Image: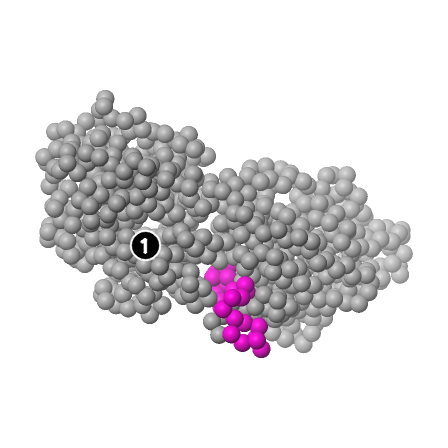
Amino acid sequence: MGILFEEVSDLMTAVTQSAPGFCEGIQYFGGSLPGFEKLGKESAIANGKNAIASPSDPAAVFQTMLAADALRYLTLQVTASKASGHPGGFASIADAIAALVMLGYKNILTEVGHHAPGFYSSMFLDRSLEDMGIDTVQKMRDRFREHKGLLGHLSGQIPGLLSPAGPLGQGQHFAMSGALLHRDILFPVTIGDGGIGEPYVMSSMAHFHTAYPEVTNFLPILVWNGYSQEHHSMVSTKPNQEMIEYWEGNGFQNVILINAKDYDDANQPGEYVDSTEFSLEKRLEFTQAILEATDKAAKSALSGKLTVLIVKQLKGAGVHDRGAKAHNLYGYHTLDNEDIVSALKQRALSPAAWELVRTNFERSSGGPASHHVVTEKELSLSDLGKLPLEEFPVAGEKQVATTTMGTLISHVGKKDPSFVLSNADGNAASGINNVNQALKILHPTEDEAYYQGPKGQVYEPLSEDACAGLAAGLALFGARTLWCSYESFAVNGLPIWQTVTQAMAELRRPTPSTVTLFTAGALEQGRNGWTHQRPEIENYFAAMMRNGNIFPLFPPDANSIQACYEWALTTKNKGIPIIASKSPLPIRTTFEQTRQALKDGGVVLHESEGTKKVVFAVIGDMTLIPVFDAATHLESKGIGVRIVSIISPRRLYRPHDTASDTCSQPDNHFLDDAGFEKMFSGDALIGVTGGASAMLEPLMLRSTAKRDIFAWKRGETTASPTELFAFNGLTAENLAKRAGDLAS
């Protein structure tokens, strides 16, 4: 293509009257390439068809090359219009993306958020972006990296795109989720060679394949371009055969590698080369190889073989620079910059070529991705029927809350075949072995002694990232799931969970909330020591509550946890962590009390009158034990006490404290001032939590009483929970003394 520039440069022009309307905003047009009159006469995807007839058809190959250049051109011009964004990584895989579209595949995902402008370019070409009012290149330029426009990294709100993409190592979760729910659809996912250097990408796919060997209809496409964000990628020195063996060693049965260097006739140095520098003949050979390899890989994945397609091509192929320097644009990379101008002119297409590319992209897969990909509509879900709730008598025998919730989880799994529970540390360790018994651990070895078998619904990789990734990904794609973890370890899975909850906040469709159960709280873990005592994760959720769609729940007993899960199952587009102990604890609430608390934030468990009134606002279940003891001490001195169990702290914020009204499925109910005063007014207010103090922020913002907080400080090895309480100052004596001092 580079040598052809000289032949057509005199045909470049800033404005071409005959250009299609969608081309408004294109900076440069080129002349027709040699062969266009014959190979571009008719669309390779015929009218009424969803894909090309053959990957070896010369017209299909020629038009795939045009499509790759169109993607490169748009990616570079759109990013340069804001002198910001990331064109280089996508440029090196544009040929494979073009091939997928020409072959009729549009449920395409990525692990690389930096590929966003390329994916937007694809959605523009197939007219998906028209659903958000972007019908010309100029409008795409105007709205790139702007509020309510095309975000710098893939978002959950862009028409036609299946999932968000930000941090590396997440995209494969969405591809596997889609494949599990839609067995006859291909879910390609591009994976950067910068990301493949991290272990969780491969390990998550390896565990998934072990658990679901029959689900192979996700297709990793390794973007092996030699560079990451600012330097060479950590896998850039691997020989080709070693890279093939790496994938084979991780269970991939069909490893297909296309190396641009095999077609290079421009004598480019190094192991990584740019196909846009080849002669036209070699460009077409390379494009045909890509097209045929992509077709072969897709058919292999759909036929039951775990397959990977590896495309080895220099980062930045066909854009303003090469290598890591192509990764992003700086402030000087405007549309007047010499490097930008030169690259755009080299990639410029004729108006007729733009029309041809647009027609192929629109016809592919039956129409715009925004009308056809699986996440553009709600997934049909099984009717759960009536939940087997069991209400225990208040003050009756102690019950294990998590085990009680396990009965409901088991019911959901039996009624809904698509339901998956994921847990890295083991359900038995969280007090929900009854779920294992009912739903079975998903494992290739059948063994009734361990409640495991190949048809189970309990997914147990050791990686919290893999646990959270599949559960959250399935929820985003429309299925019911539950991610269970020890509270101390869940932080390792939170990045993907947070990505999904943010995407849910802006989705254009309802989807089941992503629900979690975090057990084995710090106060239960005395003998395990500080390694198992990390409730600081609650600070994470406290901050996320301000998003508006995050509802951490703290049921105080076995009745409450049932009502919490019952409510969570009815919600849409929310992130709902349920945090509970796995120890037998007193029954303190009725179903109705928790249902009311889910609306108002908390429930009064105890009230007495006296000369003064002390209010204990308590988060958690075990933390209620020293609080009730402190109440007895205060009441013996004539001081009245009100104990409030805070079950849903998000309800205690004021409406303007959160972004709830910006969520696509908003829940704008907050406890009003009158309700807050009725529940928390007194002469002194003590917030008590066995976790992070930030969870009590709504109380501290709204209360005007004398107030203080008792909260977790740090872990230590102790012989009992009582000793651990004392280590953190959470004793009845300390609580009573501070309350008395404040109320005096």
Residue 121 appears anywhere in the view? no
Residue nearest the observer in this picture, 471 or 216:
216
x then y, percent, for residue 531:
56, 70
- Mark 1 nearby-residue class (10 Å; few <14, some 14–19, many ≥20): many
Range shown magenta: 446-468
Name the image quarter holding residue 439: bottom right
Residue nearest the observer in this picture, 737 or 330:
330
Q: Residue at x 37, y 61 (%)?
A: 304
Query: Considering the numbered disc 1 on the image, is that residue within a helix, a strand or a loop?
Result: helix
Taking the magenta stretch, the answer to whether it contains residue 462 is yes
Q: Quadrant of the N terminus?
A: top left
x then y, percent, for residue 388:
70, 58
Q: Residue at x 48, y 74 (%)?
A: 445
Residue nearest the observer in this picture, 549 or 411:
411
Name the image quarter holding residue 71: top left
Judge from the rendering whether residue 298 lies leftward or rightward of residue 148; answer left or right. left
View extreme (top): residue: 17
